[in-house]
């Protein structure tokens, strides 16, 4: 009871600090469904006009094609990062690999490298491989930049699983792969889910790589679409519609974060005892 009482000042402080952000999103939501007079904060007329872009592509262009592209990009990134990190993290945690310390040091260095410094080299590699201006190329580049983080995180989760659990399975006659798949993976499920959510959200918000490595409108993602809608020099620019498009872009990620925030926090803990 005393511990709960001691936590109330912290909860109150966090509530006060987050209140402006909550009010901002509330006003944004209300504003997208209303017309507000200049200089006023209060809406004066309910309308769905600002959301017509969902069914009328003549307003801001087709929003569903970049939405589908963004979903494909984020889901593909999530699958690649989770699959490779789940296996590579286990190998670095459990197997006596040669140059293991060197590989771990290299992973840390790659994670610390700003991705913008690699753009020229990545651009040349994609051109040589024939993957420039393709969604596949952007997915592979983004996944490779995320893998050092994912591998390091999953290694932390594997490190927290007691060796006795794995050795018991081996002594019962199961192969190393079977032990990993049936015994170890369920132990690190919180890490896998956290990494999957983090990879999807990171892919959803990516702007720089698709813009530079796949500038064609055929591979436009929602962040690029939002950038075109927000151009004040455009003849079709409308600030209310821009707010609606921005909210449409934000809501899926916001919903994922609210639903799985506890899982996302696990990723920064570095492991679990299962």
Image (tube, grey):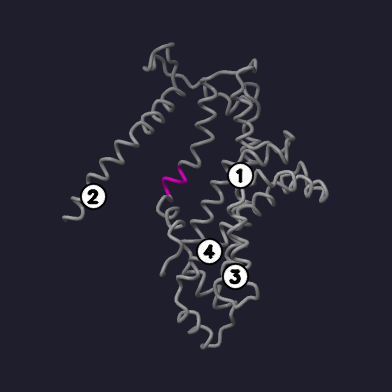
Mark before the other along the chain sequence, 3 or 4? 3
Q: Which residue is mark 4?
A: 154
Q: Quarter of the image holding residue 63?
A: top right
Q: Report, in whole angstroms, how far the alpha carbon at label 3 lies from the one at label 4.
A: 16 Å
Please identify, in this view, whether the residue under mark 3 or under mark 1 is nearer the observer. Answer: 3
Horizontal and vertical percent position of residue 202: 56, 46
Q: Which residue is mark 2?
A: 7
Q: Which residue is located at x 42 percent, y 48 percent?
A: 259
Q: Which residue is located at x 40 percent, y 28 percent?
A: 24
Mark before the other along the chain sequence, 2 or 4? 2
Majority secondary structure of magenta residues: helix
Q: Quarter of the image holding residue 13?
A: top left
Mark before the other along the chain sequence, 2 or 1? 2
Q: Which residue is located at x 49 percent, y 71 percent?
A: 159
Q: Which residue is located at x 52 percent, y 61 percent?
A: 153
Please identify, in this view, whether the residue under mark 1 or under mark 4 is nearer the observer. Answer: 4
Neighbours of disc 3 within 10 Å: few (<14), some (14-19), many (20+): few
Contact between marks 2 and 1 (CB within 8 A): the answer is: no
Q: Which residue is mark 3?
A: 101
Q: Report, in whole angstroms, how far the alpha carbon at label 2 lies from the one at label 4.
A: 31 Å
Q: Report, in whole angstroms, how far the alpha carbon at label 2 lies from the one at label 1.
A: 39 Å
The segment highlighted magenta reads: 255-259
On the rendered structure, is 127 left or right of 91?
A: right
Q: Report, in whole angstroms, how far the alpha carbon at label 2 lies from the one at label 3.
A: 41 Å
Q: Secondary structure at mark 2?
A: helix
Contact between marks 3 and 1 (CB within 8 A): the answer is: no
- Inspect the magenta stretch and tell me whether residue 102 lies in it: no
Compared to residue 251, the image places residue 239 above or below, namely above
Q: Which residue is mark 1?
A: 71
Neighbours of disc 2 within 10 Å: few (<14), some (14-19), many (20+): few
Q: Report, in whole angstroms, how far the alpha carbon at label 1 lies from the one at label 4.
A: 24 Å
């Amino acid at each position: 009871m005393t511990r709960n009482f001691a936590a109330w000042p912290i909860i109150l402080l966090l509530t006060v600090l987050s209140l402006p952000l909550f009010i901002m999103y509330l006003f944004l939501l209300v504003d997208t469904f209303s017309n507000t007079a200049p200089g006023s904060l209060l809406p004066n007329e309910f309308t769905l006009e600002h959301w017509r872009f969902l069914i009328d592509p003549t307003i801001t262009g087709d929003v569903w094609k970049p939405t589908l592209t963004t979903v494909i990009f984020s889901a593909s990134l999530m699958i690649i990062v989770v699959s490779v990190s789940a296996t590579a993290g286990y190998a670095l945690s459990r197997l006596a690999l040669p140059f293991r310390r060197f590989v771990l040091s290299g992973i840390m260095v790659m994670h610390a490298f700003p991705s913008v410094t690699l753009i020229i080299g990545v651009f040349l590699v994609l051109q040589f491989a024939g993957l420039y201006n393709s969604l596949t190329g952007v997915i592979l580049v983004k996944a490779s930049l995320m893998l050092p983080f994912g591998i390091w995180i999953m290694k932390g989760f594997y490190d927290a699983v007691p060796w006795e659990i794995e050795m018991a399975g081996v002594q019962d006659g199961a192969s190393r792969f079977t032990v990993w798949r049936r015994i170890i993976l369920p132990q690190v499920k919180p890490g896998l889910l956290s990494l999957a959510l983090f990879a999807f959200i990171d892919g959803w918000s990516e702007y720089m790589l698709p813009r530079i490595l796949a500038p064609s409108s055929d591979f436009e993602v929602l962040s690029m679409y939002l950038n075109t809608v927000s151009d004040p020099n455009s003849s079709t620019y409308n600030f209310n519609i821009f707010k609606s498009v921005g909210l449409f872009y934000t809501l899926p990620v916001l919903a994922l974060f609210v639903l799985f925030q506890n899982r996302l926090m696990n990723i920064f803990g570095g492991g679990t005892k299962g």
